[in-house]
Image (cartoon, grey):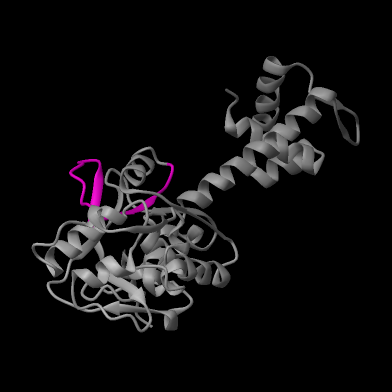
Amino acid sequence: MLNPQWLRTFAALAERGSFTRAAEHLDLTQAAVSQHVQRLEERLGPLLIRRPRQLELTPAGRALLDYCAEVGAADQRLQQRLSEADAEQGEIGLISPGSIGLALYPHLLEVQQAHPGLRIRHRFAPDHEVLEAVLDNRFELGLVTLRPDEPRLRVSRFAEEPLELLVPAGARVSGWADLERLGFIDHPDGLAMAGRLLSRRFPGNPGVRGLPCHGFTNQIGLILEPVARGLGFTVLPRYARLAFPRQDAIQVIEGTPAVVDTLWLLHRAEWPLSARAEMILRRIGPHFSSETGRPRG
């Protein structure tokens, strides 16, 4: 590997065109500048043609000057990534389940609009993929619904999100027979979520699997569309419901007891968060409440 000081000397010499001016710029002696160039030429061959009033770069010298520029740019990128000044530029990755992701994404876009130098990369994924992605350093931040027991991760509460029983607007639900009449709109987590909520709301019921299924979709943003069209009911986390644009076409059937999930924020424990991640969390954190599961503001 070439000595970085030799490279800086050669770049200054090529820019200023003389050993004297390069030495003054670098606060070195002319002998030191000559020695650095000599060391480079021992490794790479002739780099300069020395003329009385100018220096001319050989093809090897021009190639080395391009290399000096690449090294300088790489060094600058490294310093930016490690610097607090990098909080408003560069890439930040966040991976989350679909429901909280629907609520988060508009706020992430607002941050990016305020700081155009940022590149925000967000992905929807189930808990196990979120864990793998954060542990593999493919995403700096992750959110999960089940708290992991993993020493390589720092885990903290982010928000709380209740499960909701959602039916078409105007539908009346006073008992299990009403759910049978409406029919179930399923989704990848539908049976598990409905089982958890309905077993508490309607104790002694025959079970979610016994309900007629009137549809299925794996696109979280579309699950409430058949409900809004009167085709059935479903159970979803609150943030997924709040993201649905046609709120007047659906309704929440309130009841007790509540089933509330905690959303956990994950990142690697062995090193501090980047300045970008810290800034993102400061900006989006106030929009969420760990007590009610409702976005603020």
Which residue range is magenta in the image? 138-156
Q: Quadrant of residue 40?
A: top right
Question: Would you say residue 141 sits in the magenta stretch?
Answer: yes
Whether residue 205 is situated above or below residue 230 in the rendered picture: above
In the rendered image, residue 3, in percent from the top left (x then y), is placed at 58, 27
Looking at the image, residue 195 sits to the left or right of residue 282; the answer is left
In the rendered image, residue 267, in percent from the top left (x then y), is placed at 32, 50
Q: Quadrant of residue 285?
A: bottom left
Q: Which residue occupies the foreground of this view, 70 or 190?
A: 190
Which residue does the image show at 26% across and 68% down from the upper left? 179
Most extreme residue toward the left is 204
Whether residue 90 is situated above or below residue 37 in the rendered picture: below
Question: Would you say residue 190 sits in the magenta stretch?
Answer: no
Quadrant location, the C terminus: bottom left
Instruction: Inspect this view and state whether residue 127 appears.
Output: yes
Q: Quadrant of residue 53?
A: top right
Which residue does the image show at 24% across and 77% down from the upper left? 173
Q: Which residue occupies the foreground of this view, 153 or 279?
A: 153
Instruction: Inspect this view and state whether residue 29 appears.
Output: no
